[in-house]
Image (spheres, helix red, strand yellow):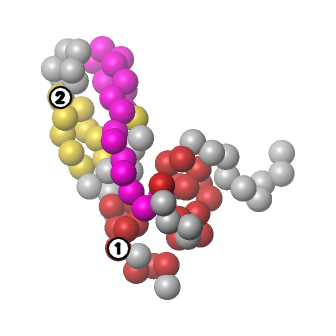
Amino acid sequence: MFDRCPGAAQIRTPTLEIRHCPRCGEEIEVFSNDRRVVCSACGFEILNDVQSCVQWCRYARECLGDEVYGRLTNTQPSGKDS
């Protein structure tokens, strides 16, 4: 069931977008599943406005897995004891 979720398509198979750093103008590769990318030329942090099913779908963690879900929501993966 979760393998065919259309909302997770760009997360499972990321797309590439080339942006320009607002500080130095250098080209920066931003993938659709990146939350933030640092410019290699000047160190400026670019935030990706990721708006996806992760924010609203109650099955997002189950669909994407703990690691990807945690990275996209800035939460720790569940089920791992430290």
Decide: marks 2, 1 in contact (CB < 8 A)?
Answer: no
Three-letter code for the amino acid on which mark 2 is drawn: His
Instruction: Confirm whether the magenta stretch covers residue 50.
Output: yes
Residue depicted at 18% across the width and 39% down the height: 18
Q: Is residue 26 left or right of residue 53?
A: left
Three-letter code for the amino acid on which mark 1 is drawn: Pro
Q: How far, Cα to Cα, is label 2 from label 1?
A: 29 Å
On residue 20, the disc is 2
Q: Position of residue 51 (x, y in %)?
A: 36, 51
Q: Quadrant of residue 6?
A: bottom left
Q: Where 42 falls versus 10 (above or below)?
A: above
| Residue, disc 1 | 6
Q: Position of residue 40 (x, y in %)?
A: 31, 23
On residue 75, the disc is none
The tag earlier along the polypeptide, 2 or 1, is 1
Residue extending farthest right:
82
Q: Residues within 10 Å of mark 1 (few under 14, many from 20)?
A: few
Q: Where 16 falls versus 53 (above or below)?
A: above
Q: From which residue to which does the magenta span run?
A: 37-54
Who is closer to the viewer here, 80 or 51? 51
Residue depicted at 72% across the width and 56% down the height: 78
Residue depicted at 35% across the width and 17% down the height: 43
Q: Is residue 16 left or right of residue 1?
A: left
